[in-house]
Amino acid sequence: MSTEGHRPHPSTKTSLIDHARSLDCIHCGLCLTTCPTYQLTGSETSSPRGRIHLMRAVAEDRLEPDAGFAEEMDFCLVCRHCESVCPAGVEFGAMMEFTRSSLREQQPPGPLARFARWVGFRRILPSRFGLKAAVLGLQLGQTLGLIRLAAPLLGLRGSVMRHLPKVPPRSERRPLPAVTPAQGEKRDRVLVLEGCVMPELFGRVNHAVARTLSATGLDVLSVPKHVCCGALHAHNGEMKDAEELARETIRRFDAVDPSARIVVDSAGCGAHMREYGRLLANDPEYAARAAAFGARVVDYSEELSLPAARARLRPLLRAGHGIEGPITWDDPCHLCHGQGVVDQPRQLLDLVPGLERREMTAANSCCGSAGIYSVLRPKDSLDVLAPKLEHLAKSGAKTLVTANPGCHQQWLVGIGREGMDVPVLHLAEVLDRAISAGE
């Protein structure tokens, strides 16, 4: 990163940086110890405070937005832990999305990287056909052993590919029905996000979500033909695509029910959808509609923690669920830091009879998944995960519970590499098994 003489006023480079938000930082340093990349390197530039300083320096023409600057922005996991401890309320995640988007436009990647991003973000994630084709390719690669052979070409460790979970059988990848009717007396109806990755890799979780919500007296409505909310696009600087996917999501969900709550079982998607109002704030046609949409989004654990839902859920839960305890809950970053949901999952787990829960040290620290960070930067990702694997071992937990597909996959890979015998479950799977034990 090269520097120039100081200029007191921001230049045209403010188009690259959200300069107004950068001024909110008071440089107190409370964020440093929460930042996974700062913990890895001990470098100030690899901390939220350091990155904001770099952003401000670029906006004020004291620093060139060169390859070194771009690398530091990409090194960040955008876990948003810094936001949880920031006394000034700095919106670091929004700043990083803005910066990455501007860098992609003004300093586009090379042809190969550009093609890979085009395939991933425009032909796979927003397309059910593209996703199924990608999953089929992964399945064939796993069956024939080609994935492990390709690992070096992809920049991945062979051990990562060896412990990558198998693609689930077709029976687990079936879509949700249009309506899963309420059991017993109906009290309300909700929409659910099936998502892009979840149906293909964690379809069983979506079905567990529908069953448990139905058991508490809710009609559960799926949204036909909807695929992707745009969270991964925004996270990686593809903001134009993220905005269009947000508009499509709003249109499709509102066509089914324009007022029902929207229950999300994937933390990253929920955090992103809640911020549609900010994302589309400059769109006169969608700004108000997006803000109203975001206000309807709730996490799965929040929905089941509502008094009416909790009252219906509690008597349904039984022992004999077959889940080995003690269990521990790991906070997905975009649930605890992105949405402020901390107590609800723990309280729901504590309702399950015969299941001891142990709190894991630093449960709210990042596991290193961070969307596709684990694919783009596998070594850094596994280095971030390493201390959490130690915390898991020290907790003595026999089952780990979380609520985000990326985190789920990351834990499965890490646990497999360490040879640990600890299953990973989604919160909905735990509650679903506890309900089924009483049937």
Image (cartoon, helix red, strand yellow):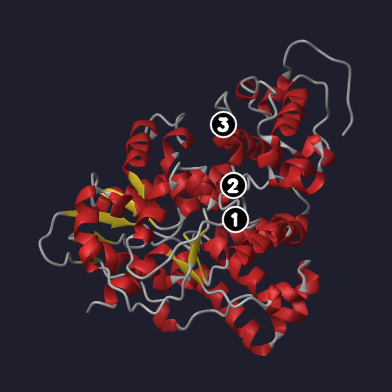
Q: Residue at x 89, y 30 (%)?
A: 2
Label 3 belongs to which residue?
91
SS for callout 1: loop
SS for callout 2: helix
> Residue 27, percent across and down?
70, 23
Q: Choose mark 2 or mark 3, whichever is in front.
A: 3
Question: What amino acid is at disc 3?
Answer: Glu
Q: Nearer the viewer, residue 405 or 200?
A: 405
Does residue 7 sit above or below 172 in this rendering? above
Question: Seen from this angle, which residue lies furthest top?
Answer: 8
> Residue 188, percent across and down?
17, 53
> Residue 387, percent across and down?
70, 58
Label 1 belongs to which residue?
371
When asked about the image quadrant of residue 43, the answer is: top right
Label 2 belongs to which residue?
235
Q: Residue at x 88, y 25 (%)?
A: 3
Label pair 1/2, CB-CB below 8 angstroms: yes
Q: How far is mark 2 from mark 3, CA to CA?
A: 14 Å
Q: Of label 1 and label 3, which has the lower sequence position?
A: 3
Question: What amino acid is at disc 2?
Answer: His
Q: Quadrant of the N terminus?
A: top right
Q: Quadrant of the C terminus?
A: bottom left
